[in-house]
Image (cartoon, helix red, strand yellow):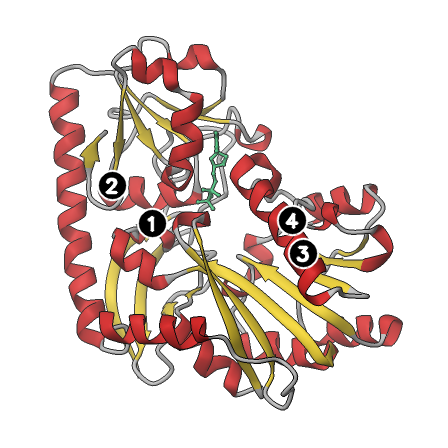
Amino acid sequence: MIKKFLDLGYQPLANKYLKSYKKLSIKKKELYRLTVGFDTKTKLVSLFNKIPDKIMFDGNYPYKSSMSKTMTDSFRKLSVKIKNRFNPKLFLEIGSNDGALIKNFNKNQVICVEPCSNLAKITKRKGYFTYNNYWDLNLSNKIKSKFNTVDVIYSANTLTHINDLNQVFKSITNLLTQDGILIIEDPSFLECIKKLSYDQFYNEHIYIFSALSVKKLINEFDLELFDIEKLDTHGGSLRYYIKRINNNKIKIKDTVSKQISTELKFGLANFLTYKKFGISVKKSKNDLVKIFKRLKDKNKKIIGYGATAKACTILNYCNIGNEIIDYFVDTTPDKSNRFMPGKNIKIKKYKKTLLNNVDYIYLGAWNFKNEIFKKERQFIKNNGRFITHVPKPKII
Ligand code: TYD
């Protein structure tokens, strides 16, 4: 049974940055209700209203993994690990984006799967074998008929974006060699709850995984966890290493039982924990709104940094518009000169001078705090301050 624990109100589609100022309407289905539930049986956290993937992942997907040094560094380190630990003959990435990970592999060793045509084009152009398709059984069969089986399948921040998880894992086991490895990484619900980062919820994040839910989910497909790594990326993620249950050559590391027991101790198996999280989110909203109001009453100039999908949830839930935040700065070319959906705050292409005469910066990309603080030492030296809502609303 799926029980609701969070209601973030009517929201626009995140990552659909608007070309011009536009008032979105519920009637025209430009806004949807963002409510989140916990399945008491499977322990899986999911959105109630799901947007069709063809609407979300099209030929204009703005997010590029290569835009941040934190992500490219993380992928480079991972590629070394995969080569040393598993030495795959054939490596497949589901959701290869603009190739931030696969660029570390030989071209004849890699298969890319990417539904967004603007991104698939990039890896194709670089000479990587790329399927511009959604991940499903049809595609899995198509790949199988050409390549037979694959040694290592990897997917970061993608499987949680696909509604039909049954098909996702069927398509994986269909293609994985008998002693093949599946590695997936996604934001950790435990970190989300600890950091009160409720902005992890938006239409693309249909599921937020915990080790508890992943363990149950994959067991249905005769798969099991054999290692878990904690990562700082995306506000705290888990990297799950998965094998077939009947593969006894690989030992199960105690990282798995440790993570599961930490989650159980934290109460991730109990609905009450989720209910309390929902109550804390309401308080977090009120506290953040108070900070913005207090600063605006003093006529402070506030801008946003990182026009993220996460910020879209915050702005719309907390009703923060361009009367509070003058503009966002962001390095992503496809976001510049667009508007934050629902709240119509302009996004400007990042340049240092846009931080001149600014008193406060709202950290839309709080998950890149260290990278951003390093870059903006001068702003901080000049007494500029940042506002964040993670782990609680405050000025830093
Ligand atoms: P991310 O947090 O990965 O996004 P989402 O919530 O959309 O999944 O995206 C980070 C955004 O912040 C991305 O649009 C690039 C931007 N950014 C900057 O503008 N400057 C920076 O220094 C960094 C690290 C990110």
Gap between marks 4 and 1 measured at Cα: 22 Å
Secondary structure category for the residue under label 4: loop
Q: Is residue 341 above or below residue 348?
A: below
**Callout 2 amino acid:** His
Q: Residue at x 40, y 42 (%)?
A: 367
Position of the N terminus by quadrant: bottom left
Left or right: 336 in relation to 247: left
**Badge 4 density bin: few <14, some 14–19, many ≥20, Cα 10 Å:** many
Disc 3 designates what residue?
115
Disc 2 designates what residue?
389
- The mark nearer the N terminus, 3 or 1, is 3
* Quarter holding residue 312: top left
- The mark nearer the N terminus, 4 or 1, is 4
Query: Residue 230: image x %, image y %?
Result: 44, 58
- The mark nearer the N terminus, 4 or 2, is 4
Disc 4 designates what residue?
97
**Callout 3 amino acid:** Pro
